[in-house]
Image (cartoon, rainbow, N blue to C red):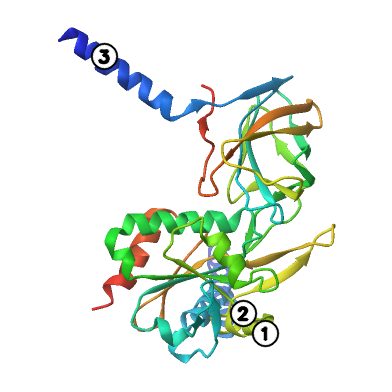
Amino acid sequence: MLKLIAATLGMAAVLPAMAHAECAEVSQGDLSISAAWSRATIGTARPAVFYVTIQNNGSTEDRLIGIETPVAGMPMLHETVLSDGVASMPHADQISIAAGETVSLAPGSYHGMLMDLNEALTEGESFPMTLQFQNAGTLTIDTDVVSIREREAPCAPAP
Amino acid sequence: MRPRALILGGGGLILVLGTMLGVGAWRSGDLPWQQEQAAISGIRAADLGAMSWQLTSHEGETVRPQDWIGTPSLVFFGFTWCPDVCPMTLLNISDWLEDLGPDADRLAVHLFSVDPERDSPAVLADYLANFDPRITGLTGTPDEVAHAAQAFDVTYRRVPRDDGDYTVDHTAGVFVFGTDGRLSSIIDLHEDPQFAVPKIRQALNDEG
């Protein structure tokens, strides 16, 4: 009986971990980036998207000023803005990450728009993305490509 | 006059002036909430029965607004080259349909393309194959799309990009129409699902 309880408890602890693998995380200076993901594309004509979580553990602001990846000729930072019910997607010159704050590039908000794709993005694969910061320099993270029907990273941010 | 009376008198005068200004603004419809109300009532007047557009579905069928009368319907505006807002809306709608259960089968759901140059019926079909099969795509010639968008009082504009390509700004809400073809509500892009699903249910229940 005790064994059964122990096994059940053990399963309960393991199951959530199986459902959400821990995200890859890359740190440099005061910054940590994790949960980088993108959606599969249909061919190469349509732009792909890039989402990521950026944590600033330092005491000074940093800014994301650019992104670069071998999969797209023209990756840019954009922000989805709603004005009078109309959605537009202006270019974001820089994205501020205040001291001690976490900023997510996430659906309906800031995102990377990957134009001029060199290859179609396939579910289950991954590609490198290099983020340029004003202070922390460049960080490269492996980006998971998930189904076109997903709305979040396939992993949970590291605790 | 004693100082206290002066203060009271002055206060009264300000109150009267303030009220007059306020009434003036109200009568001329200049208050921000009045303008918002006017915009909403313009859209609220949207009535499928009074519209006259004609579009083509992703399956190549001709669709007219009168086809939806008698069926509660959802309509949203987007394009398949849109990387962020449109997949998000399609996923939201898929979630709502799931939450509604079998009732969702009584709904007509349409993605109205605001990018007729790229979104042909075949291109729409290719894209929609990845989402809930109950979502129908609509497109047409640029003139047909412009005419239909005007009937819904929907805004869209082509925005050129640096590399010669373009994107499209567009109205982001999901329009909910009742069985009578009249607009029942609009679900905003960032609306909490706990409010979205009851809005659709309302249109379904009005079926009578």
User: Camera-side residue: B200 or B119?
Assistant: B119
Question: Disc 2 marks which amino acid?
Answer: Gly
Question: Disc 1 marks which amino acid?
Answer: Asp
Which quadrant holds the N terminus of chain B?
Answer: bottom right
**Residue A71 lies in quadrant:** top right
Residue denoted by label 3: A7
Q: CA distance from mark 1 to mark 3?
A: 66 Å
| Disc 1 crowd, CA 10 A, few/some/many (<14, 14-19, 20+) | few
In the rendered image, residue A133, in percent from the top left (x then y), is placed at: 78, 32
Q: Residue at x 37, y 54 (%)?
A: B194
In the rendered image, residue A14, in percent from the top left (x then y), is placed at: 37, 20
Which quadrant holds the C terminus of chain B?
Answer: bottom left
User: Camera-side residue: A102 or B120?
Assistant: B120
Q: Residue furthest top?
A: A2
Residue denoted by label 1: B143
Given contact means CB atoms under 8 Å apart, are the residues at marks 1 and 2 in contact? yes
In the rendered image, residue B118, in percent from the top left (x then y), is placed at: 69, 68
Q: Is residue A18 left or right of residue B33?
A: left
Residue denoted by label 2: B140
- Residue B145 drawn above or below residue B84: below
Visible in this render: residue A67? yes
In the rendered image, residue B176, in percent from the top left (x then y), is placed at: 42, 72
Front disc: 1 or 2: 2
**Residue B54 lies in quadrant:** bottom right
Q: Residue at x 70, y 23 (%)?
A: A59
Disc number for residue A60: none
